[in-house]
Image (cartoon, rainbow, N blue to C red):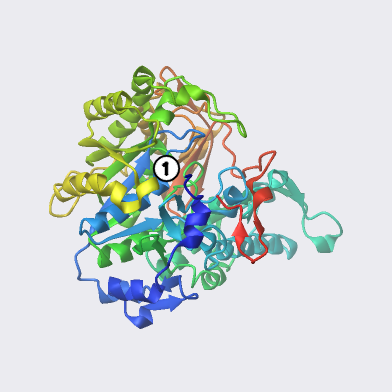
Amino acid sequence: MSMPSSLQIAQAASMRPIADIGAELGLLPEELELYGPYKAKISLDVLRRLADRPNGREILITAITPTPLGEGKTTTTIGLAQGLNRIGVRTAVAIRQPSLGPVFGIKGGAAGGGYSQIVPMEDFNLHLTGDNHAVTAAHNLAAAFIDNHLHHGNVLGIEPHSISWPHVVDISDRALRHAVIGLGSAEDGIPRETEWQISVASEVMAILALATDIHDLRARFGRIVVARTRDDKPVTLEDLKVAGAMTVLMRDAIKPNLLQTLEGGPAFVHAGPFANIAHGNSSVLADRVALKLVDAVCTEAGFGADMGAQKFMDIKCRLGGIRPSAAVVVATIRALKMHGGVGKIVAGKPLDPALEAEDPEAVRRGAANLAKQIENMRLYGVPVVAAVNAFPTDAPSEVAALREVALAAGASSAVVASHFADGGAGAEDLARAVWAVAQASGPDGASDFRFLYPDEMPLAEKIETIATRIYGADGVDFGAGVLKTLERIESDGHRSLPICMAKTHLSLSTDATKKGRPSGFRVPVRDARLFAGAGFVTAYCGDMRTMPGLPSRPGGEGVDIDAEGNVVGLF
């Protein structure tokens, strides 16, 4: 008998009232703002009430370099939390809310899968409590203020060609990547070139994920630099007098959302920055609240360990004061075969039989990628467990090859888990292994933690450090004007900021076709931009885009309502 689809499993789930889950966490009734029976927002007052309570331990879940097959990182995050709860460790999930662009594009939803999911699945993947819409509205309010200022005399002396603040929309729409606005009569605005980005690439989203309270959010909005004057001075949203109104639009969005896993455990869902074009982690506030309420928090960083996990360590931990007790690097046997040069994936076609045939040598070759990602996490002094997300076709010889490479690379252990098919019961062994290393990481949970680079290092050197130590590059090639841009950012007083690399997630290099552990490559950096409000500088590598496009057959084609009014087609 075949296993039901993830959507069918989610829709058949017997969910608990979210008020009961909040009460079990120790939240007071007035600290839980209900959005129907199964989702709620959490008042930030809880952080003041529990300020003196010790924190639980933070466990970061990351992965090998992604393949089209998917590695099940989100599923593992949820399954591990379910497994920890089963062995008696009070655990919560902390995870991002997906963007509608991927949901209706090629990726689909991000609620996990099988018997390791967050529910209600439809709400999680769609509008939830409206946070992403608030981000979009706040961002576009600032865009409107900029053009309105130009229209009404440009008192600040903004150089229109210097405006770096785009518009955003939470749908993948490639036709908006480059646009001219202000066409028509003089009453229709000042004509100029601009662009639309996807909402999760907005600095507003990055700030939502990094702010520590509503006042910090307000201050960060004010610091956002959107243009320069004719005499080359930065123009901020404080100068444009819009930061306060943006904060008002975000006053509910700043509160973390509470949902549940299929097994009734707490799941904190908040913010959704992409890891290839932004910093790729759920909010600091969600983690801080969760850490006060439970013994362990399982949080996921986007894409491979060279992307979201590197940014978790050097951006989220640096700016948010969070320290991980352990890292889990997820891999699948068939994905490692792809990294080892076996198999070809064609959309809409059956799985290549080579990926299901026993081939330990291909696994060993591909596991060079796993080894590098484990090494990347060890650079931060964090203990690592390799998680093998199991498939029925995995052969013992292939698992043995993976385990050998993982242990040689510095993993504490490599554990097979079947949480997709078996829920938390299939992740109990993984949970025991992870909890053992998390508890052994010192009384504060992170006694050996260290950053990759110091604050005082020049920005260009920070970029080179990430490229050479995390990606394995031979060096960096800065495009025309990039070093000058970095020097200007430093002269404006922002040398101490961390770096957010915008790069393909499909390779350790900037060439998406290079799988495994590539060598002999350099990283081209074509542009750099200051995100003063978020508190980092983004370096754009290769041809990275900040507005995705839809595929020839978008996933949204299959999404609909059935005769009973139920959602169908989400995946």
- Where residue 482 appears, as percent x and y from the top left, is 52, 34
Amino acid at dot 1: Gly
Left or right of residue 109: residue 496: left
- Where residue 71 appears, as percent x and y from the top left, is 42, 38
Residue 515 visible at all: no
Q: Is residue 567 above or below residue 345?
A: below
> Which is more toward the observer, 232 or 222?
222
- Where residue 142 appears, as percent x and y from the top left, is 61, 62
> Which is more toward the observer, 25 or 242?
25
Left or right of residue 229: residue 524: left
Q: Residue furthest right?
A: 185
Left or right of residue 373: residue 137: right
Where does label 1 land, which residue?
A: 72
> Which is more toward the observer, 212 or 60?
60
Q: Is residue 411 above or below residue 56?
A: above
Residue at horizontal 42%, vertical 24%?
Answer: 337
> Which is more toward the observer, 382 or 77?
77
Q: Residue furthest front?
A: 1
Badge 1: how crowded within 10 Å, few (<14), some, or many (20+)?
many
Q: Is residue 354 above or below residue 46?
A: above
Q: Secondary structure at mark 1?
A: loop
Left or right of residue 432: residue 366: right
- Where residue 318 appears, as percent x and y from the top left, is 32, 50
So how many labels did they put on this image?
Answer: 1
Q: Residue furthest bottom?
A: 30
Residue at horizontal 41%, vertical 38%?
Answer: 304
Residue 368 visible at all: yes
Among the 4 quarters of the image, the one containing residue 542:
top right
